[in-house]
Amino acid sequence: MSGTPEAAVSSVPDPAATGGNGLDLRLVPAALGTWACSLLGLWVGWAAAATAALIGVLVVVLGVSASRVSPMALGRASAGLLALGAALLAGGAGTAVRAHGSVANPVRVAAESGSAATLRVRLTDDPRPLHSAGYGGQPGGVRQVVIGAQLRHADVHGQRWSTGGRVVLIAPADQWAALLPGQEVSAAGRLAPPTRRDLTVAALRVRGSPAEVGPPPWWQRAAADLRGGLRDAAQVLPEQPAGLLPGLVVGDTSRLQQEVSEEFKTAGLSHLTAVSGTNVAIVCGAVLWLLRLFRLGPRTSAVLAGLALVGFVVLARPSPSVLRAAVMGAVALLALMLGRRRSAVPALAVAVLGLLLVDPALGVDPGFALSVLATSGLVVLAPPWAAALRDRGVPAGVAEAVTVPVAAHVVTAPVIAALAGNISVVAIVANLLAAPAVAPATVLGVLAAALAVVHPGAAEIVVRLAGPAVQWLIAVGHRSAAIPGATIGWPAGAGGGLSLAAITVVVFILLRFRRVRALAAASLLGVLLVFVPTRFAPPGWPVAGWAMVACDVGQGDALVLAAGGDETRAIVVDTGPDPGLVGGCLDRLDVRRIPLVVLSHLHADHVGGLAGVLAGRSVGAVAVGPIREPSWAFEQVRRLTGQAGVPLVELRAGQRMAWPALTVEVLGPSRPPPVVDGNDGTSVNDASLVLRADTASGRVLLTGDVELAGQAQLLASGVDVEADVLKMPHHGSRFSSPRFLAAVRPRLAVVSVGAGNRYGHPNGDVLNALTSAGTKVMRTDQNGDIAIAGGREHQIVVGSGARELRGD
């Protein structure tokens, strides 16, 4: 989701310069009334919206009556009543008609029973990828796409209904991802009820390929050529910035790496990968600045800026979200050009009114709410805050750069908290750091897209110029997301959002009093001195002299072993399912040099984070076992190591490796099977590399995901498996034999497992057997990153999530 603000541009109008300090709020009740009608009609029902329309009639009558009693009041209170009444009448009636049509649509009725259907539709948006996390033998990635469409007719149980309505297609990515908005297609599958109350009639789970595919409109073909040219030109950059640049410029995230996407969400920067009012304001602002250099008149400049706006909308695809962004960006640009909040607020109100009357479903669209709130923060809050900072001696440019992201974040935080169930505490700083790079990267990206269809070589040169700015954005997202506690939990849903909004309003009111401001400043200083060190850099973390750390990477494994000779040097065994999670753990440990990465086996929850380990670190080699299954995972590992220029090597039982503070010996598999079926998760697990590591804190047995057969083979081979610390096989699953656990006799068992996972890991009986034998159990889902330090006899175990030291 777009977590911060769409209208956060880099300059704010100076109200003092124009005398427009006052706010013209007369149209705000009308805009809010129309929004309320949309919410009532979609959440409560069409009858509620119809009732609101009747109330609108009464309000209009009241306004007319007030104007007759006192003609002078026509321009004051009665004008506001007339506007509010008209908005309620139009908004309520329009929403009621559309909501009733959606509920009564025969396709919706058929969807309630899950009927099979063939739909003829016109696509209204780009196919959006559904990312799935890999686990076990299943690869992560995109296997399905979601496409918004307008229904033409439907064939259900031999009946044909020629009816309209919005539908959502959930379709196979490999067959549907290349389609363009505006194309008409036929799709067969099974209907399902819509999951959102936004006038959608039904969802169709598509089977097979699109049929009877019609041609796209010319402007969609032109947009596809421009977007494709930008994607191709971006390939001259490294993989991460090459995927980010099209998303930053036109919202094309088809090649955006999942690692970058997740880091941007955590850092509050995900709005940069969607077309927003920011893009519109930057592009049109750049055009106006260029025209001003040529001293063109205001009318000519306005016409050319309007053409630039239309061109950008075509480039970004004229979908509902892009049109919404264009309107909001135009309002933000109006505020910047006129420098008058008095003019900007009515413009924003009219934009909200118009958009909701055209499409009532925007009333429940989180992106629309974020757009409106962020633009409101820009035109209402940021100017006086910037003026206050300037009055206190802060330079003008710095004052605007600070107040814009702060204002946008404050007003959008309740919606973000309601949607995500957390609050990003690094978003303001991250957006401040990112702001200088957004405008040049966006302008150069748009220029590259325009040049790509004319001269691809020139487009590549422009892309290279944009490269440093895009690299900076990736670095900001990566570093911000790696901060421990970058987000804090908050109740999700409407209740959580409303509670945070109420707290924000109360704080604003209280800060109007001087004594409260002084107390707030003192409290903030206390938070910085006490909370920040304990929350973001907890005492004792990373533990001095740590020997091993089990990273909290969710449902997966990622172990780090100190190699010695240099505090920044360590061996990594498995990389978890997500590049951002393992990368953040290594950043917290300040691990920058990795002589060896060992992948115990090629399941996604052990190799999925490899890119996060390779990024920005010196890696000597990546090692795998003798099994090359699943084949998709091996090819992924080979591709990543090849791109990073890191050797890919093989380990076998009996090999021994040593570093100053660490010795690692490969114990198994002693007899790998000649053939392993990549679709058989158990056989791949039992072929896991098993390592015995002698560390400064004792002997550690790293078991990958070996199950019963693999454990029995280890015991039969006669190798010494006794260890002080056992990394539990297969996330503590029930496939751990009592005989194997008794042979290991660990003092500490570490379970790397994801909270609330659907696999039942770790198994309760296995944990009880361990604790009954006197083994201490630590779990990453409960204790966070788990570090082991100290000597063998005075071992210290630290859980970063629990934030307490525990000694054995």
Image: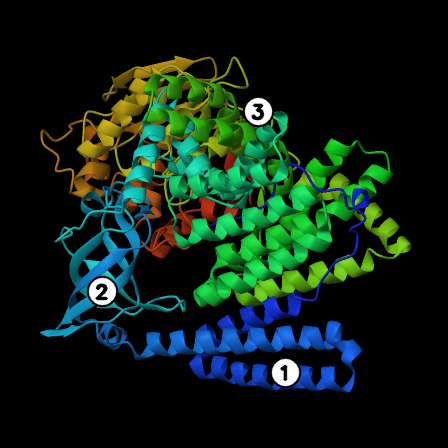
Please give left or right for residue 412 compared with residue 342 in the image. Answer: left
Q: Amino acid at mark 3?
A: Gly
Q: Report how far apart the C-alphas of labels 3 and 1 lie in the structure.
A: 73 Å
Could you tell whether 711 is left or right of 723 in the image?
Answer: left
Mark 1 — residue? 59
- Label 2 vs label 3: CA separation? 67 Å
Dot 3: element: loop
Q: Position of residue 372 (x, y in %)?
A: 58, 56
Residue 596 appears at what percent x and percent y?
37, 19
Residue type at the position of mark 1: Val
Vertical comparison of 28 with 709: above or below: below
Where is residue 689 shown, x and y percent of the image?
27, 29
Q: Residue drawn at (18%, 45%), measured in percent from left and top?
A: 175
Assess disc 2: are there few (<14), some (14-19) or many (≥20) residues with their C-alpha within 10 Å of its C-alpha. some
**In the displayed image of the protein, which residue is found farthest to the right?**
515
Q: Earlier in the sequence, mark 3 or mark 1?
A: 1
Q: Nearer the viewer, residue 569 or 123?
A: 123
Where is residue 77? Give x, y as percent: 74, 75
Residue underneath mark 3: 545
Q: Nearer the viewer, mark 2 or mark 3?
A: 2
User: Who is closer to the viewer here, 778 or 773?
Assistant: 778
Does residue 472 sit above or below 354 in this rendering? above
* Residue 460 seen: yes
Q: Would you identify the image quadrant in which residue 746 lies?
A: top left
Q: Which residue is mark 2?
A: 152
The residue carrying pointer 3 sits among few (fewer than 14), some (14 to 19) or many (20 or more) residues within 10 Å by Cα, namely: some
Mark 2 vs mark 1, CA separation in Å: 39 Å
Task: Give the foreground label among 3 and 1.
Answer: 1
* Residue depicted at x 53% and y 14%: 566
User: Tell me, what colour scheme is on the image?
Assistant: rainbow
Could you say whether the residue bearing mark 1 is in a helix, strand or loop?
Answer: helix
